[in-house]
């Protein structure tokens, strides 16, 4: 039932995206692919933080794992694209399992620290073994649109199609997972691990599983990034990427798939728009160059002040105030909603209060 | 309860698509440079304008110093624009920040090529960053002119028919430094210290073509992300090296010098052009020493460092090129210090104007490639260019210099060579032409 509904929704979304990609300019198609990369990566992180209550500053490293897997499979084994994307996700998931085994024993700042180390250390392996990973200059990946589409078919539209499809598939899987028993169990261990364990849940395994799912998403995103940018190099997987993913997840709204979409849109589009505006107003080089970063910071601060639950949470509140829902039902921030109403709701901002406890542990 | 979230996914789907479509509709209409004017001969070229783009590290780790280059090139373009432009067309130079992140480079170059429809990508900065876009530019036949990287990899007309290097490549530089060491430090023990990537490895390739292997007693590397170079310095000292050749960026030249100072070890330092700008070095030395609780005189420590240069030295105020670029700098880019980076930016801007003038009254992407392959006259560089249909490298040589009192002083003639193991390092017999009086090629 749920699966069917999600599938129908995904097909509709796919049709609209397809129509859009045909209408849009080549560069906008490219941006669509870029946004898709971030949506997948952020969705994976959002599930980890928002549902299982763990934090990761290392998902940029899992993206690197996926991206290098893609490059190596394509260069050495000549695998086709449809096989490479899931394979990259699988390899990253295996990496996630290993890290998850260690991470399940850690919590709060220790977990953040361990995953931070991953983000810093893993990409530099590529520099240490230049023979395999191409060193600083990386490996190039060439993906061309299938010949059956015609020689004049825009390459960026093909990229947009591939990435949009991969994103929709990922979102359907994640949406189902979140509503399945696994998703409920994750929420249980997030809200109270001791109670969950007493109720018979295997807390450690559930935590590892969340890491696996999150890493698989990051790996797929890395593979998509490799295909989109046609290059895999350590410079693309810096610590700031991992931080950007976290910022995107928080900005969009933790634990919500729609929030991941908002996060991806902000990360990709805000700098581009602001750069356009800054350069069209003839600002001096040094100022114009730093404005996108400043604007990103301002957006982050404003969103956090205005919408503590992220953009998605904020929109829900607004919608709740203007639509049929009586405002009293929403209650003040921090107050737990009636359990039956939103208990299984992945998109509800109400999962925020319990998360914030973990958040504080994780980031303080 | 079913009702409460039955709309959830469709809502997500609708929002995803709506936002992506909204994103797309934004400013996609502004593209296209092919208006109806008669002289609009190529993308980015109208009857009144030549639009070019670039990716530059305006923020991030590579920004200090390097972020001065594009504004300096733009200053020279403004000077040209104010003096009639190129065949009546004004140059518009759009350089976007990539933060030295290859993924971002891909993004901004797509934006420049697809959305802004630039005529060419000019002086894209960095080896790892530019490698990310060179295949894309070439498969789309976008001229990729005068890349700001000394990697030998651009000089590959078969793979990259639209790419051209400009500055002296690191292999040639290594050979020129190596030949100098072979001649002046015969029999002395030599140690290498180099960045473990294309830059350092190419440099060492060149050094090894000239310096006998028996003379090299130690080879130490560093990666730019790890500032702990103490062990490498200790190993070099232990090897008994009397001459240390350093293919390093300025920060690591300074770190090596300070580490040697700490060890009480005083070899002769030979440093590649990239890592030897005296002003930058002196500042870094003083800053690093201060962090370690010591006070040093930057200019005292750089005294005697041997290096090379492919543009006239800044202190050579009698040089007509320095006078020209100083004048342009003072008018259009006065806020930046007149240092090596600014000189570089203006000089490469000059080369671009040379190429465009040669590409004809109504230049096309193919005609500018052909123009450069036909050879570009020697401009601000001390040695000529070697551009041809089979060579897309750039400058052929440099002089050897020694840092004295915070400035590089040229020693002896300009040396030229090629990138092969057998090509000799010979002294350049020609003289550098004077800068044109009106400052335009």
Image: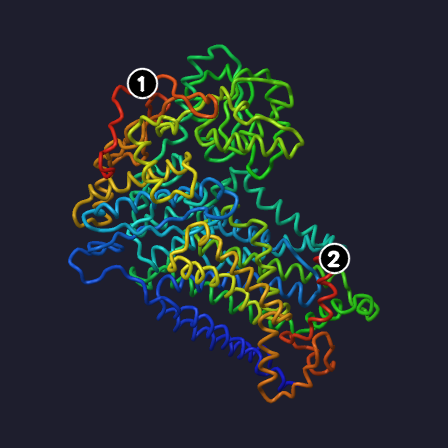
* CA neighbours of label 1 inside 10 A, class few (<14), some (14 to 19), many (20+): some
Residue furthest top as drawn: B187
Front one among B115 and A105: B115
Q: Residue at x 64, y 49 (%)?
A: A118
Front one among B351 and A280: A280
User: How is the model colour-coded?
Assistant: rainbow
Q: Quadrant of the C terminus of chain A?
A: bottom right
Letter of the chain that mark 1 sits on in the rendering:
B
Q: Secondary structure at mark 1?
A: strand
What is the number of the mark on residue B427? 1
Whether residue B51 is situated above or below residue B278 in the rendered picture: below
Front one among A307 and B318: B318
What is the number of the mark on residue A260? none
Q: Secondary structure at mark 2?
A: helix
* CA neighbours of label 2 inside 10 A, class few (<14), some (14 to 19), many (20+): some
Q: Position of residue B228 (x, y in %)?
A: 63, 33
Quadrant in the rendering for residue B237: top right
Quadrant in the rendering for residue B434: top left
Q: Position of residue A166 (x, y in %)?
A: 50, 65
Letter of the chain that mark 2 sits on in the rendering:
A
Whether residue A156 is situated above or below residue B359 in the rendered picture: below
Quadrant in the rendering for residue B440: top left
Q: Quadrant of the N terminus of chain A?
A: bottom right
Q: Position of residue A310 (x, y in %)?
A: 61, 69
Picture mark count: 2
Residue annotated with mark 2:
A108
Q: Is residue B371 left or right of residue A141?
A: left
Mark 1–mark 2 distance (CA, rounded to whole Å): 65 Å
Q: Residue at x 48, y 63 (%)?
A: A270
């Amino acid at each position: 039932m749920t699966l069917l509904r999600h599938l129908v929704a995904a097909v509709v979304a796919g049709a609209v995206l397809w129509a859009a990609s045909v209408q849009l300019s080549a560069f906008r198609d490219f941006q669509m692919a870029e946004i898709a990369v971030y949506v997948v990566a952020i969705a994976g992180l959002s599930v980890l933080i928002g549902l299982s209550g763990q934090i990761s500053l290392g998902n940029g490293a899992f993206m690197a794992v996926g991206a290098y897997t893609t490059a190596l499979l394509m260069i050495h084994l000549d695998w086709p694209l449809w096989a490479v994307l899931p394979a990259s996700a699988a390899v990253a998931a295996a990496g996630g399992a290993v890290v998850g085994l260690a991470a399940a024993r850690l919590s709060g700042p220790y977990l953040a620290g361990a995953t931070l180390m991953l983000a810093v250390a893993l990409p530099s392996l590529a520099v240490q073994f230049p023979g395999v990973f191409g060193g600083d200059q990386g490996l190039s990946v060439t993906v061309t649109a299938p010949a059956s589409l015609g020689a004049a078919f825009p390459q960026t539209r093909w990229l947009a199609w591939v990435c949009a499809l991969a994103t929709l598939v990922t979102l359907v899987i994640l949406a189902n997972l979140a509503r399945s028993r696994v998703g409920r169990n994750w929420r249980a261990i997030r809200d109270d691990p001791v109670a969950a364990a007493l109720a018979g849940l295997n807390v450690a395994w559930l935590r590892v599983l969340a890491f696996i799912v999150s890493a698989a998403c990051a790996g797929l995103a890395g593979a998509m990034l490799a295909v989109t940018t046609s290059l895999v190099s350590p410079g693309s997987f810096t610590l700031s990427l991992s931080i950007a993913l976290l910022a995107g997840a928080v900005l969009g709204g933790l634990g919500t798939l729609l929030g991941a979409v908002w996060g991806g849109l902000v990360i990709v589009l805000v700098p581009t728009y602001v750069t356009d505006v800054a350069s069209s107003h003839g600002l001096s080089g040094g100022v114009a160059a730093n404005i996108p970063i400043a604007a990103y910071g301002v957006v982050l601060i404003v969103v956090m002040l205005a919408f503590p639950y992220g953009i998605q949470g904020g929109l829900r509140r607004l919608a709740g105030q203007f639509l049929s829902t009586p405002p009293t039902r929403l209650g003040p921030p921090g107050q737990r909603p009636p359990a039956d109403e939103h208990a299984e709701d992945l998109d509800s901002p109400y999962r925020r209060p319990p998360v914030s406890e973990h958040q504080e542990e994780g980031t303080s | 309860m079913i009702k409460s979230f039955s709309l959830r996914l469709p809502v997500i789907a609708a929002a995803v698509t709506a936002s992506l479509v909204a994103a797309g509709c934004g400013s996609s209409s502004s593209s296209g440079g092919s208006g109806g004017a008669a002289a609009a001969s190529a993308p980015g070229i109208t009857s009144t304008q030549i639009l070019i783009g670039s990716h530059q590290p305006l923020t991030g780790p590579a920004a200090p110093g390097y972020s001065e280059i594009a504004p300096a090139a733009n200053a020279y373009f403004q000077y040209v624009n104010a003096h009639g432009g190129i065949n009546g067309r004004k140059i518009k130079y759009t350089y976007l920040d990539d933060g030295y992140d290859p993924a971002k480079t891909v993004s901004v170059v797509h934006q420049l090529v697809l959305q802004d429809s630039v005529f060419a990508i000019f002086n894209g900065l960095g080896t790892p960053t530019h490698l990310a876009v060179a295949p894309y530019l070439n498969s789309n036949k976008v001229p990729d002119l005068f890349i700001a990287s000394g990697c030998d990899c651009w000089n590959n007309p078969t793979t990259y028919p639209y790419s051209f290097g400009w500055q002296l490549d690191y292999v040639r530089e290594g050979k020129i430094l190596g030949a100098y060491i072979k001649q002046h430090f015969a029999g002395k023990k030599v140690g290498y210290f180099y960045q473990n990537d294309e830059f350092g490895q190419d440099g060492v390739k060149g050094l090894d073509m000239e310096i006998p292997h028996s003379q090299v007693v130690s080879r130490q590397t560093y990666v730019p992300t790890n500032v702990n170079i103490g062990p490498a310095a200790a190993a070099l000292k232990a090897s008994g090296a009397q001459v240390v050749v350093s293919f390093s960026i300025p920060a690591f030249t300074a770190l090596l010098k300070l580490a040697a100072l700490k060890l009480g070890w005083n070899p002769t330092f030979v440093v590649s052009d990239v890592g030897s700008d005296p002003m930058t070095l002196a500042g870094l030395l003083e800053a690093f020493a201060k962090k370690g609780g010591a006070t040093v005189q930057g200019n005292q420590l750089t005294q005697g460092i041997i290096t090379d240069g492919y543009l006239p030295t800044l202190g050579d105020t009698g040089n007509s090129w320095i006078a020209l670029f100083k004048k342009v700098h003072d008018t259009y880019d006065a806020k930046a210090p007149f240092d090596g980076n600014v000189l570089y930016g203006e000089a490469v801007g000059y080369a671009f104007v040379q190429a465009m003038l040669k590409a004809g009254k109504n230049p096309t992407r193919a005609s500018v490639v052909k123009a450069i392959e036909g050879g570009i006259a020697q401009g601000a560089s001390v040695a000529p260019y070697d551009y041809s249909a089979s060579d897309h490298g750039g400058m052929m040589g440099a002089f050897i210099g020694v840092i004295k009192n915070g400035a590089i002083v040229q020693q002896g003639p300009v040396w030229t060579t090629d990138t092969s193991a057998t090509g000799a390092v010979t002294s350049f017999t020609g003289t550098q032409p004077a800068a044109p009086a009106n400052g335009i090629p």
